[in-house]
Image: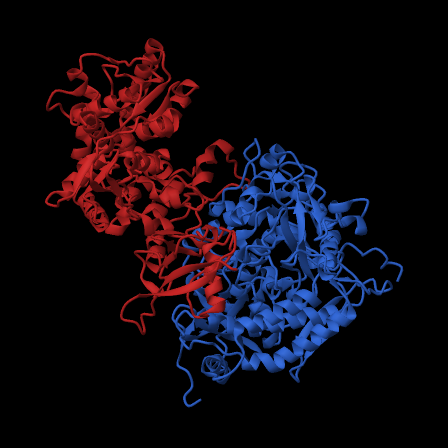
Chain colours: A blue, B red
Amino acid sequence: MTQPPRYRTITCDVLVIGAGGAGCRAAIEAAKHNLDVILLSKELVGKAHTAMAEGGYNVSLGNVDPNDNVETHFKDTIVGGNYLNNQKLAEILVENAAERIYDLEEMGAVFDRTPEGKIAQRTFGKQSWRRTAYASDRTGSEIMVTLVEAIRKTSVRVFDEMFATKILIHDGRIAGVTAIDLKYGDYLIFRAKAVVMATGGAGRIFTVTSNAQLDVGDGYAMAYEAGCELIDMEMVQFHPTGMVRPESARGRLVTEAVRGEGGILLNNKGERFMHRYYPEVMELAGRDQVARSIMTEVLEGRGSPNGGVYLSIAHLPRSIIEFRLESMIEQFEDAGVDIREEPMEVSPTAHHFMGGIKIDTEAAATIPGLFAAGECTGGVHGGNRLGGNALADTQVFGALAGESAAKFAKSHDLAGLPREDAINEFQRLEAMLEREEGISPADARKELTDLMWSKVQIFRKEEDLQYAVNELRRIEREVVPRIKVDVRDKRFNPGWHQAIEFGHMVITARMVAEAALMRKGSRGAHYRVDGDPNDLGYYNIVIKKGKDGEMELRKQDLVITKIVPPGMEAK
Amino acid sequence: MTKTVKAIVQRYNPDKDDAPYFQEFNVDYEPGMTVLDALLFIQDRFDSSLAFRWECRGGQCGSCAVKVNGTARIACRTKVDPDHPLRLEPMEKMPIIKDLVVDMAQTEHRIRRIRPYVARDKPAPRPEIIHAEEIETLREIRKCIECGACLSNCPVVHETWDYAGPMIIRQLARLELDPRDVEDRVAMALNEAVYSCTTCKMCEDICPKNIPIPGLAVELLRAKAVEAGYQLREGQQVFLDSINKTGRSVPEKSTPLLKEIETEEFLVENPRGRVAFFTGCLIDYRMQNTGKALIEVLNRNHIDVIVPKGQWCCASPAFRTGDMHTATAAAERVTEIFEHAMEKWDLDTVVVACAGCGKTLREDHRPLIEKKHGEPPKFKVYDLAEYLLDIVGKENIVPPKGEIKMKITYHEPCHLGRGQGVVDQPIELLKMIPGVEYIDDPYKNRCCGAGGGVRAGLRDLSMKIAKTKKEYIEATGADMVTTECPFCTIQIRDILKGTAIETRYIPDLLAESYRKGDKN
């Protein structure tokens, strides 16, 4: 390369990366301190995955069940998390959920009401009381719309369609990030006194996911590369029933109510295969159990041609289907399937990452000046997340991270700029465009997602995980440096975006696989078919990039404040 | 063998290309395929640099709106038609960044200038008590995902950014309806030219969240403006004064139809049905022959037609411009007249030949009367073409025999197609006339610019929209454009003056064919 790529440098006080529920909330909070806040959004603002959340926001207001309180919410969260949660973080979640939902109302959110005019609350899985606040079945959208309205009221500078690629560190402190402008392809450096990561999850490292297209794990990979600690990366929540086709709808959620109403699961021989696994409860076994059963059928060759199984309600009276599964009828009509007549094709879908950037009670990551919130963090939800706790997480930890980042920015000067690192990064990105020969991102991506989907998914075993880890190391070594973009345009070039994302996906995938390999027993969402029954699994796995550039994993004691996991007292 | 669909995709990189161009791709069709599937197929298979936006693929985020065969829609919920080529272009009005990706920055700034958030004058109490009734309409209008498709399709925005467009007017209504918001949203709506909307309902039709923006936002804000004492334009007020004084929105010129005809009863031997004819102002006062043609067409099809005297305006101009006082009084009166006719002549069906009146009777009178009296008007309302095709039945329609040898296209009145769901029936009727070569206009459902009080109040804007309509019509190469709305007819006749293209009302054309057929 003859000349270093041209770039521009933009400076602010607080930089928030990611414009979903947590990122927007962090930016709003930081802006209250009259600082210069920049919000980087990888998509158009308002289009983040938060908008796809349906069910609701857990908060123990007791508006419907007056006996509910923060202690019960805490207990449900810890038990639901299989005791792996950082209990200090879980306390923060349950204690602040109420104030943060009132913040949303103050900003203009419209939640459904009780007859007294208070926020209505409904039943959700594994919770002691009706605790989940909602706006019909579009709660995430309601929250996203509200936050966008609120952002438009603030002085926050929004840079949309900006893709942050690397965290810059100077003298051990946060200095900013490098980014590309997706619209025009320009290289940028964003310098800031404090940075908040709110980059969401990584469902897209699996072939099948309920996640939006941009949830590829950018934040996990960037934090790892910067030297942050990450925690619980092996904990990935799979939902048993996602759509299989059409291609663009693959992984879209199919509500559990389908099975609740009497839907049956069939394999390609027409057998009601749940007999084989959970004959007593059949299709109504736990989510993880059903997901495992379905995957067994598929992997053993009894799946549908498209890699799923069949979910049929055609035996039910039409009136029941039309009345109670109205939206499913619509969703499958879009797919050209009349669920009153034909079976749905379904398979498990990667849904949520419980693990992520390790944070403390100030939402601070392990690098000074770096904070994080939302799905990109780990610790709040332990081994399994309760439905409704994610939206609450975005608001509670988004606000906390924004506040902490503002305080940090006010008490620190701008760190120096590691210009060479930035230039190296831009040259790396440039090389993808200039390479004469190499591997296309679409092919590379397929190889990666298929590997993760077949070897590191719902139920795991040593040899698969070892195979995956070996493969991922090979991909990191041999494929990532050879990624080549077909067309050299920088202006809005999805091929280039995918090429950059691919590197992030590989690092994220490796963390999931390496941590899963380390955890020998089953716990939470991590199920080992060859699980060591003596391994109770009461520890967290922390990942960090070592000094030699190798991935370092270590076990860490649980953070316990109130609830001692069963079986642990004796030891 | 896999079926393939030809996708014709607009490409453009402003850094390299002087102008947009089209590129064709063969897409392997799969049942249920969406436009987004097709785009992803092309991106993966042929060109990874093809630029388009998408995120959620489930109609939740609003990223993927593109023009599909001329109309902007979200790609993830729009089906690919396996039997037709798929033409994909970027949304209109927004500058192209690349291929199908447009620059939304101007839209974002326009949203920001309306202060698009709940403005409070004091901190919110915690908890805040809000009753479900207070937010019922608000919830409906709040589902917007800002995909921008309505802005691309809006015939007014197409002509001028003086009008903020459906999405933004909707946000103003959302805030006006919020009991917590203290800003003067009505004044803002007037600044954003809320009176520019023709209420063509294009925005509502393509909205992925089915938000009835003209009714729930535009007309609501206009009604609030009238309530707050803002004056309507002179051209609009004249109609309303006239309705209140005479029951007709326009002054009398030649002898009105209702005076000219000697009887209220046009009966046939062995009738297969009986309907009352709601004439509307323009057929009564300006297009008497069309009224007579309609009676004749129905009679020829063995339908008794009752034309009650003393009819009253449906007050569409009042509903559209926000004069709810005039609107309500008219709705009550019209309901009374026709419920009386139902009893007197033992019938239950009212046939309307004016798209605007039909829409108003069905969409505006019904809920209003139901709210006031606990039940909607007792009679059913049909458009003429709809009545003939759906009630009489195509097989029972007496075929018109007189040949009309012409190339004929059709303009779908907004308040007939999107207002009443009558889309195919008028075209079916046209095709029944011997000699007619029907030419389909892909833009037949685009507004002519007359409605919503725009022709009455903002003539320049109205004519701009009409001029665009003229271009669509001329592009068909037809000798004649037909329609089913007097207001559209007047507007289109105006704009086609000086061209060789005739403008006709469908009942007139039908009657002509019947009469010609008699002679042979």
Count up the numbered dots.
0
| Quarter holding residue A523 | bottom right
Q: Is residue A37 above or below residue A322?
A: below
Q: Position of residue B135 (x, y in %)?
A: 47, 36
**Above or below, A475 relative to A322:** below
* Residue lying at the far bottom of the rendered structure: A2
Extreme residue in the front direction: B520
| A485 and A337: which is toward the camera | A337
Relative to B25, say whether B272 is above or below: above
Q: Nearer the viewer, residue A342 or A280?
A: A342
Closer-to-camera residue (B480/B461): B480
Q: Residue at x 33, y 12 (%)?
A: B340
Q: Is residue A256 visible?
A: yes
**Residue A13 visible:** no
Q: Is residue A570 left or right of residue A192?
A: right
In the rendered image, the quadrant that contains the C terminus of chain A is: bottom right
Q: Position of residue B222 (x, y in %)?
A: 29, 36
Which sits in the foreground, A21 or A499?
A: A499
Q: Is residue A273 left or right of residue B18?
A: right
Q: Quadrant of residue A564?
A: bottom right
Residue A110 at x, y percent in the picture: 50, 42
Q: Position of residue B143 (x, y in %)?
A: 46, 44
Quarter of the image where the N terminus of chain A is located: bottom left
The outermost residue toward the right is: A570
Q: Quadrant of residue A325?
A: top right
